[in-house]
Amino acid sequence: MRVIGVYNIKGGVGKTSTAVNLAHLAAESGLRVLIWDLDPQAATTYYFRVQAKVRGGSKKMVRGKSELGDLIKGSDYPNLDLLPADFSYRKLDLLLDDSKHPTSQLSRLLDPLGCEFDLVILDSPPSISLLSENIFHVAEALLIPTIPTTLSLRTLEQLYDFLHKQQLQSLQRLPFFSMADRRKTMHQEMMQQLPRKYPEFLTSWIPYASDIERMGIHREPVTAFGRNTLAGRAYQRLWEEVIGRLRLRVKG
Amino acid sequence: MRECRSGPGGERNDDSGQEFTKHYNLERESIPIEPTTVDGDCMTSATATDRHFSLAPSSPLAPFLAALEEQFGCLVEPPQEVIRTYYDSFDWRLLDGGGRLWHEQEGRESRLFWSGSVQIEWRQRGAVPRFSWDFPHNAMRSMIAPLLEMRALLPQVKLHLTRHIIRILDQEQKTVVRICLEENRVAVPHGEEGSVLPLAVRLEILPLRGYQEESAALHRWLTTLPYLHKSAPDLLEEALAVTGEVAGSYSPKLHFHFTPEMSARQAACEIHRFLLAVMESNLAGVQGDIDSEFLHDFRVAMRRTRSALGQIKGVFDPERVAHFAQRFAWLGQITGPTRDMDVYLLGYCDYRDRLPKPLRSDLDPLRDFLIAHQRQEQRQLAKQLEGSEFQQLLTEWRDFLTHEASHDGGPTLGEVVDRRIDRLYRKVIKEGKAINDHTPAEALHELRKRCKKLRYMMEFFQSLYPAPEISRLIREIKRLLDHLGEHQDLEVQAEKLRHFAHQMAAEGEVSADTFLAMGMLVGDLLRQQQQKREDFYQQFSSFAERRNRRLLNDLVTQRGELT
């Protein structure tokens, strides 16, 4: 079982749509995929038309009183399951802090699912918290959607600093441009500058596209309802690059 | 079955070599495969049966779909057209072993499925492998190989499936459970292209994780429908029943039910007709060179025919018997060389394993020689079997048996068989006891022939005797025969290898290393043969022990005493 986190300190950068579309493409390629919506806003859960509710809430989950496997919901797509969000996730940090090994709780919870899934995608809420530290510990790679603006550069630097201080160098970082608008000069400039400073930047990027916003109307991944749209194709390119970077063995 | 490391598949480019290597397992599979660790295929546990329903072929589908739509919000996905072909060996070894192998073609998607103690799905590209060793080293191969052995996979039953996936939706239009509905047709065997027969419509509930209640509600509702049967028959079994085909109807095993009062002629005719049917069933496979087992079964039936002709005495005209004995001896001669080559190729891995590892590759030219000569002999054989001589034998023999079966009279089976088995047994004991260290090997071969006659007689007529006793005696003689067979095979193989060496030298340049390796092999075979010879006395005395002698004596004399 491989685990990837989709993360950025900043909100509104396209984390959820990245998680949803890559999970859909991964499942289509034959991998058994679990997407875990860790954001109490529950946007991923909404896109999959599932009720944002976890039986027993996050308290029972973290304290090991409910099996994670029992909380999983099958999606409308073969090979793709969802762990829905719950409003109680807003207090997840407090619960984690209460436990014995606060930064490895996610890892402990996911462990029993090892033989059921090939890939787990964690959709995380913004900000640096104990939950994000858990994600850094359990994931082998972080997909970091980055809007090509100066503000984004700042948050990226903050994240890198944090990972460095926490000695998390082995965590693979996969930043890529998200919500990019090539008509904007600033976006163009940043898309040239940033990869020079951070060579690990993926070459594929996701444009700012209304099709992605329409995911909320369709309540489906854009790769399902608009496979050949600009956005749909961009996510496919991104997925191909992620397969290559992480050397994922896809079956299709 | 054992396999060798370096097969010729990748080394030879001419079709001949590749075509013929396929018939034998010439590659080693040294590590047993853990089903769960193989790439490319995915394994799951067996599916639950209580999710299956079927609709009688006469019930229309439309009312069901209308009722479903009224009860649940649902969405029917576009239908998928699937061609499913079940594969098995000629004698259905996979089905006998409790498994089913099928191939599904849906558009460009091609998948192979195994269903047995585990379910395996493999996204396979290209043609369905013909032999188990043509499979990549995956979980499917590890399931199939022990059952299939040297036999080829043949397409046995072809189905046309129209698959509808119906999604049951909740208020959010989210799928909560699926139904897989299949309208199936089976292709009529040997029928015109496209001619099919309908099968029952099948339904399977496909539950979705986390929506158990919704699955249960659907299940409850389906069980209330009067036109739905709870459960669906196995699809392969249903298809076979509809087409009237019987899986496993072919078996070369002898199962006669005779009585001592029966006419010996009628019994002889029944045996011969059965053996003729076995030969005829295997004929196409022998001619088409599908796998080596067709010729094997063909020859066993032919040998049994020869033995029955010679041993069931006093029932047919001796002149006709002599004529047919001579014709079947000819059939033995023309089929022998191909079988010999088959045997060497099937046992080739064993030859390699007998040599020290560094010398094993020296034997490769022998393998190529065997492949080339098997091909030659096979061609020759196919020609002979198409020829008028063989066809005439079949017709004459069939007519003869029909004619003889229409006559009554002559001795009863009890009179003929008891005496014959008794005499054969006495001869076996006498000849066996006469063998000592100085007896030429020829005497052991003669003893083996005699034992075979005795074994066939016991097997043909075992229904005349109490089962435990006759089975015990058959087991005993089989054990002795195995020993004598191995002794003789080792000698013949050693001799044949020397002959091959001369032939290889005459046919082209072969390195001295190959001959040295073959020489070592000959030495090893002869050493083993000597060991078998030394063990003979123990094997024979176990067979000829007083208990067995008395047992046989009781069996063949009790009838006389009773009457």
Image (cartoon, coloured by chain):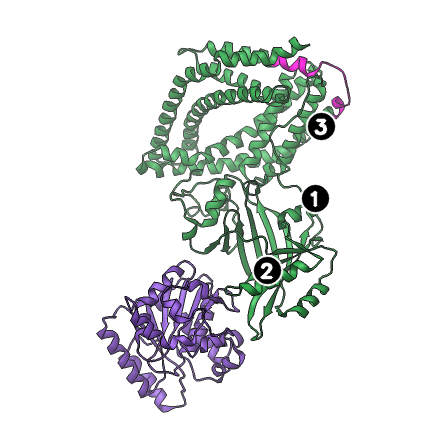
How many tags in the picture?
3
Give the answer, above or below, for where A117 lies relative to B27: below
Q: Colour of chain A?
A: purple
Q: Chain of mark 2?
A: B
Q: Report the residue marked by disc 2.
A: B205
Q: Which residues are magenta?
A: B402-420
Give the answer, above or below, for where B479 lies relative to B510: above
Q: Position of residue B164 (x, y in %)?
A: 63, 63
How many neighbours does mark 3 have within 10 angstroms: few (below 14), some (14-19), or many (20 or more)? some
Q: Position of residue B225 (x, y in %)?
A: 69, 60
- Between B114 and B55, the residue placed more toward the observer is B55
Q: Report the residue marked by disc 1.
A: B244
Q: Which mark is residue B398?
A: 3
- Tag 2: residue type? Ile
- Tag 1: residue type? Gly
Which residue shows up at 70% across the image and 48% down it?
B242
Left or right of B337, for residue B363? left
Disc 3 from disc 1: Cα separation: 26 Å
